Amino acid sequence: MPRLPEVAVYGHGEFRQVQSWRPPLDAPALPGETPLKSLNRLAGVSFQAADPFGAYEWATRISVRGFSAAQLGFTLDDIPLGEMYYSTLNGLYIGRALIGENLARMRISQGSGALDTAAGSNLGGTLQFYSQDPAEQRGAQLAQTLGSQASQRTWLRADSGRLDNDGKFYVAAVHQSSDLWKGSGHQSYDQVNLKYTQLFDDRHLSVYYNFSDRQEMDYQDLTRAWIDQLGYRWNNYWPDLPAAIANAAQTAPSGVPVKGAQAVESPIDAAYYAAAGVRRDHFGYATLQGGAGLAGEWKASVYAHDYRGASIWYTPHRATPGAAGSPLSERVLAYDSQRVGGLLSLSGALGAHRLSTGLWYEYLEATQKRLFFPVDRSGPAWSPYRFPEPDSASFTQWAYRFDSQTLQYHLQDAWQANERLSLLAGFKSSYHRSEGRPTVDQLGGLALPQGSLAVLGGFLPQLGLKWSLGGRNELFFDLAKTLRNYQLGGFGIGQSPWAVRNQAAFDLAKSRLKPETAWTYEAGYRFGGELDGALLQAYQGALSVYHVQFSNRLLNVSPGGSLLAATSGAAVLANVGGVTMNGIELAGTLRFGQNWRWQQSMSYNRATYDDDYFSGGERIATAGKTVVDAPRWLYKSELAYRRGPYHLHLQADYQSARFYTYSNDQSVPGRWLFKLGGGVALGRIAGVGQAALQFDVLNLFDRKYVSTVGTSGYTASGDYQTLQVGPPRQIFVTLSLRL
């Protein structure tokens, strides 16, 4: 019986800590699961979600070695996906860019990405995803998933096989929907992928198109106190509008939410009528690559992304006027952005040297608006599952337009000094300029700011060393400097320089701000080999240690002293010091006989703030405190078995406690989660095609736990409405057919 192929490769031959992963036959992902969740099997990765698929973006969080998603770089087929946080204007979540069944492999660089990675946000590592190419043979695939919370997912794919002109393509489509596991409402999406490849002698063309249309009803953000007092399954009122109206009108004095049994702090915010997010994306690229002289190759790509989105909240803090009006209104943050770009790279051999260079350019236009729509007592003007038409808004509080350009250049030399020693030296130069200007300002008081900001990283070096010890054993060392561009966003949005209240606050920030930068140092040992033992037959793995010095951390703070008057009391985006991270990771895979695989990893990361900071004239004691949402310990284990048509796997995932205040006075405890899965190949059914059955049981022991922290940001201290609880045990069954 042939040995199962490896599914995790620990970066053999790389100058930095890298892991590659592909969907395994003996432990396949749950259909519909975001690829980000699959990466949670790897060392240093922490993934959290409030739904079983990890598809609900408001509560989806991934961090690598303490760096959040907003500080990582993401690409698909080497095309930049941009920044990945909920209110981003220049980014695309991988789950909205690629159907999971069309994923070929993933590659993660935990420390610093390769110089040729097209990203302006990779202060930390990079996550690279690669789509499947069309199949050589004509055929079709169909899969149907059913499960908990009335979940249903239908996936179809048709491959043309190789055509007479040496081209081939596939078309794939999916529809997925599921009810919320607590409260009422549903989350659903439709998605289409099209990929075409063509061979021309020594050239290869790839064309890809993706369409995604999502509607996501939100789970309510909670505090620790609300979880303790109101219960694990507490959620919003949807679709009970009378109860939401009664809550807004009556609970503030009583302290008891309408559907609650106990008094809580801020009962008007303990539950809302509803909140939701809708997203629609068109994304595509064309890549042409071929050979060149001196054993070289070149590659050129162009891409475009058109995005429309709306984040919806039925707020009890603004009433709908008029006799029929309710004490609620629908507040919408509307997004509209278009980005286009191109990449060009060239590499070639010159003796013992491998030289590579390349350019990346991107242009972005985007608008962002805060709109209000009426909610009458008979019902809202717009469903939370639809895009509200801006022209029907009763009030436009503010609107912004942003234009930005990014240009990056890289050059590196990989030198094979001798049979054992390889050296790498290179650098990246990065330039990013953004301009924001308000087009509507009805906030009252001082005018919203306008202006431009530029980020220049003229020399971002990277050095690497690799020493072969023979076989699959090698030592490596890497150091790199990385930089992150400023975020884009209007009033009150994240850590955008334009999020401040007036021009004076913006001008002050512009005169003082420095972009976030980091120096990463890492070293490690990779190992692997074959054994003749009857039990243990093969092993591979990696041990790595790292030190990161993160500088110029950005945070919105209240000015004090003379600055209070100069900015009219408005908050200011400021650099508040540094972060130091020290860690160690051990990951490996053992193969027992022909049928068993045991993959596991353990990570330790001590990430602490270097400095106190001041806000409103008060010193906030954060020096030496642990970084928010940065668990110190992570452990992953996956035991997989495959024999003949049967496969079975058990996964374990542990993470230690996490803080959600900068002063570390509030935390959520550590937790263990387990997943059980398996399946059987049923063979040919009724002469139609090859069938297979798969089952997945998530949160096997039905653990109650806090999953995501920081959904509404972080505070210096005190309990805060920024937590999401994880889903209970969920069971899914998938029947697939290959024609």
Image: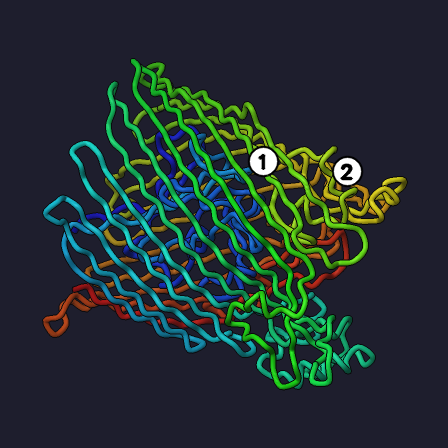
- Horizontal side of residue 67 vs 53, given as left or right: right
Assign a secondary structure to mark 2.
Answer: helix
Quadrant that contains the C terminus: bottom left
Task: From the viewer's side, name the closer residue of 298 and 598.
Answer: 298
Amino acid carrying label 2: it is Leu
**Residue 343 visible in the current orientation:** yes
**Circle on res. 265:** none
Q: Write down the residue under mark 1.
A: 433
Task: Classify residue 9 by image quadrant.
Answer: top left
Residue 345 x/y as whole percent: 36, 29
81 over 180 or under it: above or below: above
The residue at the point 28 percent across, 67 percent down is 143
49 over 242 or under it: above or below: above
Task: From the viewer's side, name the closer residue of 611 and 281.
Answer: 281
Amino acid carrying label 1: it is Arg
The residue at the point 73 percent across, 42 percent down is 506
The residue at the point 35 percent across, 33 percent down is 12
**Residue 260 visible in the current orientation:** no
Mark 2 packing: few (<14 Cα in 10 Å), some, or many (20+)? some
- Horizontal side of residue 703 vs 358, given as left or right: right
Task: From the viewer's side, name the closer residue of 425 and 275.
Answer: 275
Q: Write down the residue under mark 2.
A: 508
192 over 614 or under it: above or below: below
- Do the CB atoms of the residues marked 1 and 2 lie less than 8 Å apart? no
